[in-house]
Amino acid sequence: MQQKLEALRAEIESAMQKTETGRALYEVKVKFQTGLKGVMSGMKDLPKEDRPAFGKIVNEFKQNMEEKFAARETVVKKMEMDKKYAAERIDITMPGKAYKAGALHPITLVKNQLIDIFAGMGFKVFEGPEIETDYYNFTALNTPKDHPARDMQDTFYLADNLLLRTQTSAGQIRVMEKETPPIKILSPGRVFRSDDDATHSPMFHQMEGLVVDKGITLCDLQGMLAEFARKMFTSSTKVRLRPSYFPFTEPSVEVDLSCSECGGKGCRLCKGTGWIEVLGAGMVNRHVLENCGVDPDEYTGFAFGMGIERIAMLKYGINNIKTLFENDTRFLTQFEE
Ligand code: DAH
């Protein structure tokens, strides 16, 4: 019996020394208990008078082993913690992971600036639908079917009478139909044309403006555009109106701003002219007012429309419109002021 106990002790102690985890130590403990039970089962074969003495030996053996298990448990626990700490070690000298906040898209920035500038002059924002009827996009704007001016804008038709709006000017009609003058609205939005090169994209953004009231003249338009130019570009930016043609305005003008790059002396950006064309405008054609139920003998108005991409490209010195739509965040995050 004594030998059996000694053999068990040797086996368990050596197994115990090899354990490195609480789990392994637990398994050795189970093995020990099973082994001890085996030895104890031999007790019934001992002569009766030897049993108490042997019982005492077994008890001492058990207590001794339990102490050893407890000691090993402390060691194993420390091993486990050391391992865990090593695995979780943080090198505080490593560069951190930067979580970058997004930035507003340059188109959004310019759109917001435009709204700020014109809201300061009393304009309200109206947003029309991107899918328009032929009537709002063309006919009501004094551009009936077969009008040659329709060729100026290559249109995406969805159905006979439905199209992707080619200009935010469609919003002018929607507003004038509903509201009675005085009207002072700004209408930003996406427009679509079958057009695609370094300065044109099939989808781009426009900002439309419309003012209708009694006694509105071309001078009001010019004064308001001068204010816009100074606020959007520099305080010395000048405005020039050139005669032009749009079916929905009469007279119509193209609006140039003095080149912000060279200040008007002439450079590559303005192709040596000192001026940069930025928008179309004019006095609302009386037919358009009539189409909307506004009496052209009582009211006059002016309208203007500009490409937001064009303003953004001029303002930020971007030379390819496509970079605005490639979603490269290294490019897009450069503009927030
Ligand atoms: N809708 C014109 C275009 O897309 C721009 C324009 C010109 C708008 C004259 C106007 C305007 O309101 O009066 O080319």
Image: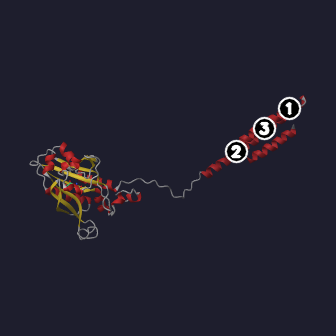
Spot occupied by residue 295 in the image (x, y as percentages of width and height): 11, 46
Residue drawn at x 86%, y 32% is: 43
Above or below, comparing residue 64 to residue 201 in the picture = above
Residue nearest the viewer, comparing 4 with 321: 321
Q: Is mark 2 within 8 Å of ligand 1?
A: no
Residue nearest the viewer, comparing 272 with 33: 272
Residue nearest the viewer, comparing 74 with 307: 307
Q: Earlier in the sequence, mark 1 or mark 3?
A: 1
Mark number displayed over residue 63: 3
Q: Give the quarter of the figure containing the C terminus.
A: bottom left
Crowding at mark 1 (Cα within 10 Å: few <14, some 14-19, many 20+): some
Which element type, helix, strand or loop, lies under badge 2?
Answer: helix
The residue where tag 2 is placed is: 74
Q: Give the residue type that dot 3 points to.
A: Gln
Residue nearest the viewer, comparing 31 with 13: 31
Q: Is mark 3 within 8 Å of ligand 1?
A: no
Above or below, comparing residue 70 to residue 45 in the picture = below
Q: Give the residue type that dot 1 points to.
A: Met
Q: Is residue 151 visible?
A: yes
Mark number displayed over residue 43: 1
Q: Earlier in the sequence, mark 2 or mark 1?
A: 1
Label 2 close to label 3 by CB (< 8 Å): no
Most extreme residue toward the left is 297
Quadrant location of residue 59? top right
